[in-house]
Amino acid sequence: MSQDNIQSTLHENRHFPPSAEFVRTASLSSEQLNELYAQAEQDNPGFWATQARKEIDWQTPFTTTLDSSNAPFYRWFPDGKLNVSYNCLDRQLEHNADKTAIIFEGEPGDIEHISYQELHARVCRFSNALKAQGITQGDRVIIYMPMIAEAVVAMQACARIGAIHSVVFGGFSASSLKDRIEDTQAKLVITADGGHRGGKIIELKATTDTALNQGCDSVKTVIVFKRTGHDINMQPERDIWWSDAEKGHNSDCEPVWVDATHPLFLLYTSGSTGKPKGIQHSSGGYLLNAITTMRWVFDIQDSDVFWCTADVGWITGHTYVAYGPLATGATIVIYEGVPTVPNGGRFWDICTRLGVTIFYTAPTAIRALMKMGDDIPNSYDLSKLRLLGTVGEPINPEAWMWYYNVIGQRRCPIVDTWWQTETGAHMIAPVPAVTTTKPGSCTRALPGIDAAVVNQEGEEITHADEGGYLVIRQPWPSMIQTVWGDNQRYKDTYWPYFDGKYYLAGDSARRDEDGFFWIMGRIDDVLNVSGHRLGTMEIESALVAHPRVAEAAVVGQPHDVKGEAVFAYVVLRGDRPTGGIDDELTQELRAWVGEQIGAIAKPDDIRYADNLPKTRSGKIMRRLLRTIAKGEEITQDTSTLENESILPQLQGKA
Ligand code: WTA
């Protein structure tokens, strides 16, 4: 969202209190919420200890709640033991065994209902298969799958045996996959022959082969799920079909009880510098906030059909597909494909047919569907929906209003949830039966979450006309544990200021007169493209790795559907193309970035210049480049530019 938008939304006077009907049926009342805030205020760790005893089945109860002796490496419930998969599946078996856990819908239209009993059996059988391949506690397993039920089975199976999974989004390239495999030193990769997306097949196995051919010596086994049935290569000795791996294994597998601090998973995310970092999450603390937010923010109830549209390749797909909903015994929907196949009504069609009651998606999807007009959603029966959610980027008030009026039919509260890969679960979000929402604000921090906006000195800013750093001032259970293999980077990235006492989120924010948070965007060189984080440095390194590129600078450009689009300025080795136009090369560079990182990182636009604008000390003038990308008038001082003639080149005017 631009500064101007923020200014106008801060004076947002549209307020949406929850409907009486929602308040009547919700599980958390205003009094109960106030009680939670009061308890957390009084004794923060004590508050979480109570929640942890209530929400988690511990094999060995914890006696220490929080060990801060080696801050910022906080350890929650350090002497407790549990198993996350046990908490998701086994505890449903006694009373809820026949309840549907997963309704899976493939993009081609195939549908499968999987009960808790059946999911438990599948997870156990696959756990046994993993053990038979030599996977034990602490081993890393890469999951590179389509968005199908087996992706969740694979994650749960790793959790069951104490293996640490790292899911790689199916849209990432061979090169990104290889980087993640090498950083984790994974022994095993779980993939599929392919998946259905956008009416096409995504070649997951072929891409895995390419990655493994470039190194990845740690990988001994590749398990391949047959999804599409198209031809692929299987390398004897190394590759095994999922069904063969499972053969002869039974559907019981004793969970491995791990310490609460045992890593449940690693998930790679982009930062301002270097390669993506492996965010390491715990088992106990992570699970706790996955559960509490399912209750507080999603008001999850036994009769709900919960659909979070995120892919398991992102944190949202971890917390609100694979773990949180199952740990609360919910029925979830998993959909393999894109919202526009066979047409723009697919999401609403699924909501209608499968009786979705809670729907959670990203602003970029809302904007894309909004553009297609109201007639499409209006032709479906969305009356079962009772709660809507958004995540991933600030939602513009226009999209919020459309979501509220057209999809929620003014009946459903909207929960705009602010959180990050690193926070593990929602941090700032409405409690739907209590909070009066305002379009564009993620409202208040949840109980036990000490979020604040501070200035450079760490002093809290509470008045609306000043923005500052968004920080979290006390540890919380689902917090990042470290960056995999790089404790120093963890400290440097998240605890650089304020004497290392506050977690730095990397976002800037403001509070309005009600204390509501308004997120303004990243303070680092991270773009948010369709709700996905991309480091500008990462894309720049990909570009300069191309033999024809000498220098590159990447900035974000406002985009009405994606939020931000990737905009690249490139200096070539040799001559600049005449008039700055070379469509063929532009296509080649786009494809190149797609290969280096993945399709989401492809620049929308590339401008060629003789040099990049730099300060006297040699720093690229990014602010100037952003101004140009936005098509705004240049107000910066350009007199220090060595070569002023590049300005029209950068502007695409010469
Ligand atoms: C942004 C996704 C405004 C923010 C769960 C954050 C948001 C980054 C919101 C994390 C929101 C996420 N309002 N901005 N409701 N939710 N963001 O790690 O910049 O993929 O730092 O986690 O997305 O992205 P990540």
Image (cartoon, rainbow, N blue to C red):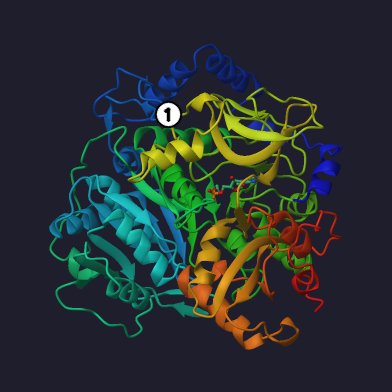
User: x, y (%) of residue 571?
Assistant: 63, 74
User: x, y (%) of residue 127?
Assistant: 22, 53
Instruction: Choose between 104 and 586: the one closer to the eye.
Output: 586
Q: Residue at x 78, y 51 (%)?
A: 405
Q: Residue at x 52, y 72 (%)?
A: 593
Q: Is residue 111 left or right of residue 33?
A: left
Identify the residue under disc 1: 72
Instruction: Choose between 646 and 408: the one closer to the eye.
Output: 646
**Crowding at mark 1 (Cα within 10 Å: few <14, some 14-19, many 20+):** some
Q: Is residue 421 left or right of residue 578?
A: left
Residue 226, above or below 271: below
Instruction: Choose between 398 and 279: the one closer to the eye.
Output: 279
Residue 26 seen in the current view = no
User: x, y (%) of residue 462?
Assistant: 74, 24
Quarter residue 376 falls in: bottom right
Residue 67, above or below 369: above
Residue 334, above or below 116: below
Q: Locate the C terminus by quadrant.
A: bottom right
